[in-house]
Image: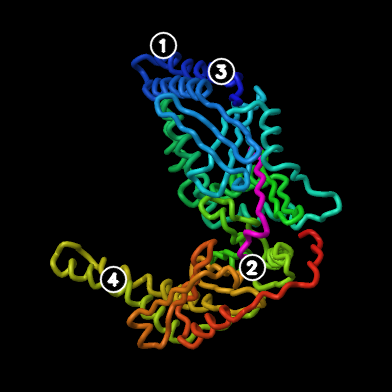
């Protein structure tokens, strides 16, 4: 059985000293004249964390066998985890700030399921590289095989410029505010001096810069390439992540397009595959990109040569729009009626009952957007479904991956001769909402009668995106 690196002891000693000194200085220097309790609490937390790491170092063991990986840990409550090597989907290698000077790394072994994944913190840098090579083998892109996608400078702008970029500044701003409070500096004076307009105007570019830094740290040297029958993604600056996806487990591709992105024709691409649903981010194939680039990459990911995400969709009946409009009006009206009852009873003063009605233009626009998003079609061996007003999702599922159907009709759908078709696959459950009954029956019949044609040759992978 292998052990964690003994260098973790030095990291713990430095961490304990670094967190204890500020508390001691705060007590001696500030005394009763300043709030020293935050410094004392930080010191206690630092010492407890160091002791916890020491116990973990003494009790953690791991081993790599030809068919499995196992880890034993714990002192009072012993844990023994065993993972079959053919279940491993990703191996993340990273270094914390305190680990880098001592050549330590954190290795996370992901199986796609949160319960069976685990981390080894901290290994020697060489041991971490050896373990990663043992588990994933050589995952360097072959020189003769072009990459499907590699990071470009424009990617940073696409993913850093967000509507909510200002909120990236909120956390650091509160941290700076409370830190200055320890020294009796009131940062609220700056707010009164500049005013809310200038504060927001300054916060947006700072938030975009913070988003850009976070994106680069996560996607540094991003490369998506194919090695044999395996799709491989490598990325990361501080935490290098390698994810392997077997073609035999791929069930389709999906696009995610929030409302704010659609006018810019930007989309995020994910791979629909078994074994990667539960692990956060593991199914994401490409970050936010122009739709044309995402479609080109998706066509190279699907090795059968089909481009289902570019197929025109069959529109759903206008009764679906009527239903969405009724719900868009009913929500604000009902809330307004409830507030009106409270107003008549005197519980709520003023014209607050009319406030929900001001949301009607927004809800009506979202209803129209939701109807425009509805659609489905058949494209070769793929079933394509689209839905979503605020977040539009388009999925292309292999028809031979469908294992079941679920038909649902509300009272209003029965009146309008419509129904919602649920599609069950090993990689998740998807729906065609508010289709007509004829469309629903046709959809199921076409999927059931389809037989997969074996291509005479696998198409060559196109140029890199």
Q: Indicate the secondary structure of the residue bearing disc 2.
A: loop
Counting residues from the start of the chain, the first of labels 4 and 3 encountered is: 3
| Distance from the alpha carbon under mark 3 to that under mark 2 | 51 Å
| Distance from the alpha carbon under mark 2 to that under mark 1 | 60 Å
Q: Residues within 10 Å of mark 4 (few under 14, many from 20)?
A: some
Q: Name, please, the residue furthest toward the left.
A: 345
| Distance from the alpha carbon under mark 1 to that under mark 4 | 59 Å
Counting residues from the start of the chain, the first of labels 2 and 1 encountered is: 1
Residue 303 quadrant: bottom right
Q: Which residue is mark 2?
A: 265
**Foreground: disc 3 or disc 2:** 3
Foreground residue, 429 or 464?
429
| Distance from the alpha carbon under mark 3 to that under mark 1 | 28 Å
**Quadrant position of the N terminus in the picture:** top right
**Foreground: disc 4 or disc 2:** 2
Q: Is residue 76 left or right of residue 253?
A: left
| Distance from the alpha carbon under mark 4 to that under mark 2 | 36 Å
Q: Residues within 10 Å of mark 1 (few under 14, many from 20)?
A: few
Q: Which residue is mark 4?
A: 354
Counting residues from the start of the chain, the first of labels 1 and 4 encountered is: 1
Question: Residue 396: in sight, yes or no?
Answer: no
Q: Which residue is mark 3?
A: 9
Q: Indicate the secondary structure of the residue bearing disc 3.
A: helix
Q: Which residues are magenta?
A: 238-252
What residue appears at the point 25 percent right and 69 percent down from the top-left corner? 353
What residue appears at the point 48 percent right and 21 percent down from the top-left corner? 55
Counting residues from the start of the chain, the first of labels 3 and 1 encountered is: 3
Q: Which residue is mark 1?
A: 28
């Amino acid at each position: 059985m292998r052990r964690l690196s003994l260098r973790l002891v030095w990291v713990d000693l430095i961490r304990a000293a670094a967190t204890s000194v500020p508390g001691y200085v705060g007590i001696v220097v500030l005394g009763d004249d300043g709030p020293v309790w935050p410094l004392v609490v930080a010191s206690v937390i630092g010492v407890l964390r160091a002791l916890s790491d020491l116990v973990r170092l003494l009790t953690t063991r791991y081993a790599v066998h030809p068919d499995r990986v196992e880890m034993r840990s714990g002192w009072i409550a012993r844990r023994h985890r065993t993972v079959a090597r053919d279940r491993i989907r990703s191996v993340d290698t990273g270094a914390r700030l305190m680990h880098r000077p001592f050549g330590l790394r954190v290795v996370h072994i992901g199986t796609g399921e949160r319960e069976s994944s685990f981390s080894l913190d901290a290994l020697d840098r060489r041991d971490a590289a050896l373990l990663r090579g043992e588990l994933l083998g050589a995952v360097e892109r072959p020189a003769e095989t072009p990459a499907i996608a590699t990071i470009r400078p424009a990617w940073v702008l696409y993913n850093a410029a967000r509507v909510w970029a200002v909120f990236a500044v909120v956390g650091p701003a509160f941290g700076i505010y409370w830190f200055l409070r320890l020294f009796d500096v009131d940062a609220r004076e700056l707010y009164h001096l500049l005013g809310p307009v200038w504060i927001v105007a300054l916060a947006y570019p700072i938030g975009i810069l913070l988003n850009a830094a976070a994106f680069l740290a996560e996607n540094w040297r991003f490369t998506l390439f194919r090695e044999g029958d395996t799709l491989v993604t490598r990325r990361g600056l501080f935490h290098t992540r390698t994810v392997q996806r077997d073609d035999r487990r791929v069930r389709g591709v999906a696009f995610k397009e929030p409302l704010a992105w659609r006018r810019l024709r930007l989309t995020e691409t994910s791979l629909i595959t078994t074994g990667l649903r539960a692990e956060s981010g593991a199914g994401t194939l490409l970050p936010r990109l122009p739709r044309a680039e995402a479609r080109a990459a998706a066509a190279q990911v699907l090795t059968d040569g089909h481009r289902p995400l570019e197929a025109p969709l069959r529109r759903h009946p206008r009764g679906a729009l009527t239903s969405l409009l009724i719900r868009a009006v009913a929500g604000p009206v009902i809330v307004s009626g409830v507030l009106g009852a409270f107003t008549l009873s005197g519980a709520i003063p003023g014209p607050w009952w009319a406030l929900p009605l001001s949301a009607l233009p927004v809800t009506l626009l979202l209803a129209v957007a939701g109807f425009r998003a509805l659609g489905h079609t058949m494209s070769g061996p793929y079933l394509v479904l689209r839905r979503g007003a605020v977040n539009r999702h388009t999925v292309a599922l292999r028809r031979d991956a469908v294992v079941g159907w679920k038909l649902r009709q509300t009272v209003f759908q029965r009146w309008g001769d419509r129904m919602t078709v649920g599609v069950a696959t090993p990689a998740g459950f998807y729906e065609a909402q508010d289709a007509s009954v004829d469309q629903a029956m046709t959809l199921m019949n076409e999927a059931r009668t389809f037989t997969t044609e074996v291509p005479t040759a696998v198409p060559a992978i196109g140029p890199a995106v």
